[in-house]
Image (tube, rainbow, N blue to C red):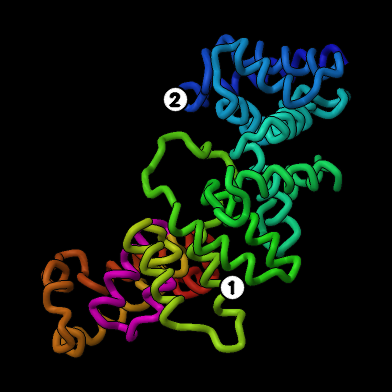
Amino acid sequence: QEHRTALDKRNRQAYYRMVHADRLLPCKLEDANKAIDQFMINKKANMDPATNARWVAKKFNMELIHLPMLAIPLFRIPDTKDASGLPASQQATVGAAILLACSAAGDLQATLQILNAVYYSSNGYNIPLAAKIARYYSPNDINNCKKTLQKLAEGEDGKAGATGDANAMTLHGKFLELEGKTQEARYFYDKAVEKYDLKVHRGYPHPMALPWLTPWMAFVSLERSQPEPSHAKIKQALEFGALKADDPLAYYQLATLQQEKTPTWLAYMNKAAASGHVEAMYTLGKFYISVGEQPSSYLKANFEKAFNFMMYRKDGGPSHLGIEWLRAAGLGGHREALDELA
């Protein structure tokens, strides 16, 4: 066991060194392992989890919000080849304990990391990391995290005011939906859109964290599930997500609401594809190939400005651009794109 502990510590230090190089470590590099070790010492001494999280953060000159940034990378540290014959690595176990303690202390990111893992792994999302994280938590742990989430969503004024964090409101709404409380969920989605922080904060949430659900897409999903969905409300929510929050998924969904193969449709689809939406890449690939085959029909449809730059390219024009988009989609795992390129 001592050999395993030493190996974990060595691997963790090497991994933290890479994280530190990307300026994503919330403390001095030499303090990262010390903070982990101190947390585990306190845990073995049966210190209250929330107290432990606050105490360790303070000791190493961090805020509570920084401690989950040490825990989140632990789930991604690969074991080394010389680990054969040793007990299993404890990296993820340690990370899970730190996240749970931070959630008990009221930290948003830790709570979302745990409950996003629970939500994704139990609702059909193909995110292996979510399943890996979720299995470390008991039903009692999850219930306690949900209580913290509710407090973070409701804020100081309680549900009537819903003055809490927009990201907490969104995930809380998702769990309310699972309980059949769709009206309450809608209320929190509406409030979350109102309070959503459009600023980009470098390193927060941690880039290795599970993706945070967005309130506009949560609202759209709920609205579309209704017997008579409001297309106007769906469009309004998607416009917020796309035009204000620059969300590629919202851009793609908004594009699908436009008349196909029009300049507005193309602008939205381009935004989605450029931000990494694989289906949008595939759609653009097919579109530009069709433009290359029949350019005159598109030039008559108000696409002159959009296509002017490519019609005289020496590399093949629209058709070549279409192939490039198909390749990008294929690299993203899009099966139909790979078939088109075969």
Amino acid under disc 2: Arg
Q: Secondary structure at mark 1?
A: helix
What segment carries the magenta color?
Answer: 253-276
Q: Residue at x 77, y 25 (%)?
A: 49
Specify the quadrant of the image occupied by residue 160. bottom right
Identify the residue under disc 1. 222
Provide residue 162's location: percent of width, then percent of height: 56, 53
Q: Is residue 91 above or below residue 174?
A: above
**Is residue 257 a member of the stretch shown in magenta?**
yes
Provide residue 281's location: percent of width, then percent of height: 40, 67
Q: Is residue 208 visible?
A: yes
Mark carried by residue 23: 2
Q: How many marks?
A: 2
Q: Nearer the viewer, mark 1 or mark 2?
A: 1
Q: Is residue 78 visible?
A: no
Q: Is residue 110 above or below residue 9?
A: below
Left or right: where 279 falls relative to 289: right
Left or right: where 166 falls relative to 68: left
Specify the quadrant of the image occupied by residue 232. bottom left
Q: Quadrant of the N terminus?
A: top right
